[in-house]
Image (tube, rainbow, N blue to C red):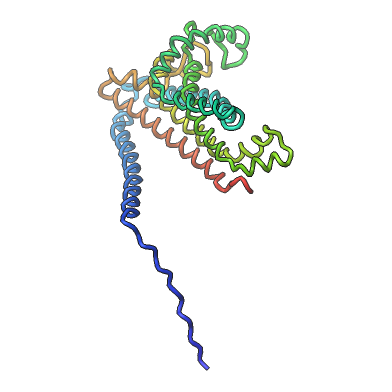
Amino acid sequence: MSSTATPAKTVPKAATRPGDKIFQGVSTAAGVLILAILAGVAAFLLVRALPAFTAPAEEIGEGGLAGYIGPLLFGTVLSSVIALVVATPLAIGIALYISHYAPRRFAQGLGYAVDLLAAVPSIVYGLWGIQWLAPQMQPAYAWLAENASWIPFFAGPASPTGRTIFTAGLVLAVMILPIITALSREVFLQTPRLHEEAALALGATRWETIRYAVIPYGRSGVISAAMLGLGRALGETMAVALVLSASGGVTFNLISASNPSTIPANIALQFPEASGTGIAVLIASGLVLFVLTFAVNALARWIVNRRAEFSGAN
């Protein structure tokens, strides 16, 4: 007795529309273009910075290239960290207020106002910082130098103008606040309604619902928003150049007249008068900033991917 095998049925493939092929081709080309631009920028910086790496140390200055870029890198990271520490808690609080506490009409208007803050030019923030914020902060710096000088950050003597690295960090905090707030607000609004209703049904208060349902669900998005704001702070030029009275060096004293400069502000101020090896040195500092920004984004991506398995239901 012989048995015949039933041939497997073949599922016909869906017909590919011309529009799908065009969209796929455009998307692929856009992705390749981004990678090509990124590689081109890196290659340009590396080639133009090579003379700085091979130049004699005495031609660059005391300490050579590392002695020149090191304080600038320190000032860039310090001002950006100050901005991130100040702006992130405020941004999360504002985002939670807009998404879960404020009346709907008021929340909508407040959300528009926060979004508009992101469109203010950096030169305006710089003028505000040098004309209003720095003079207002100077009495506070004098008080800190007199009463809290045992803390290394406030060792003093206080700057007579208020144009310190801490003031620059506060200006940067105001600049990145709308970015972190807008993204965090959208993330919090994506929390499944059933998760919040389940928490309330179990007897949780509104704050407990936010603490155990909303914040854990949007944690990776908040981290991404904070890293995006940090990238903005690292690359800010004109606002820092206007506000900061830089004298060079490395110091953790946040209120004195001796302040480290930042890489973007230093490039903006020194590039018009630079020539020869000086231009190569400035481009080398820009290469360092490029690598730093890339490393920050890579770290943010790694942190977000670690929580990619979290869905809010496990």
For residue 209, above or below residue 167: below
Q: Quadrant of residue 146?
A: top right
Quarter residue 140 falls in: top right
* In front of the other: 265 or 231: 231
- Residue 249, percent across and down? 45, 18
x, y (%) of residue 297? 46, 37
Decide which of 6, 297 is in the foreground and name it. Answer: 6
Q: Nearer the viewer, residue 263 or 280?
A: 263
In the rendered image, residue 293, in percent from the top left (x then y), is placed at: 43, 33
* Residue with the most extreme left position: 276
User: Taking 3 as reference, is 224 above or below it?
Assistant: above
Q: Is residue 91 visible?
A: no
Residue at the bottom extreme of this rendering: 1
Which residue of the protein is positioned furthest toward the front in this rendering? Answer: 105
Residue 241 found in image quarter: top left
Question: In the displayed structure, does residue 293 sit left or right of residue 98?
Answer: left
Decide if residue 275 is on the left or right side of residue 244: left
Asked whether residue 7 is in view, the answer is yes
Would you place residue 219 above or below residue 171 in this image? below
What residue do we see at 51% from left, 17% from top? 166
Residue 314 percent location from the top left of the image: 64, 48
The image shows a total of numbered marks equal to 0
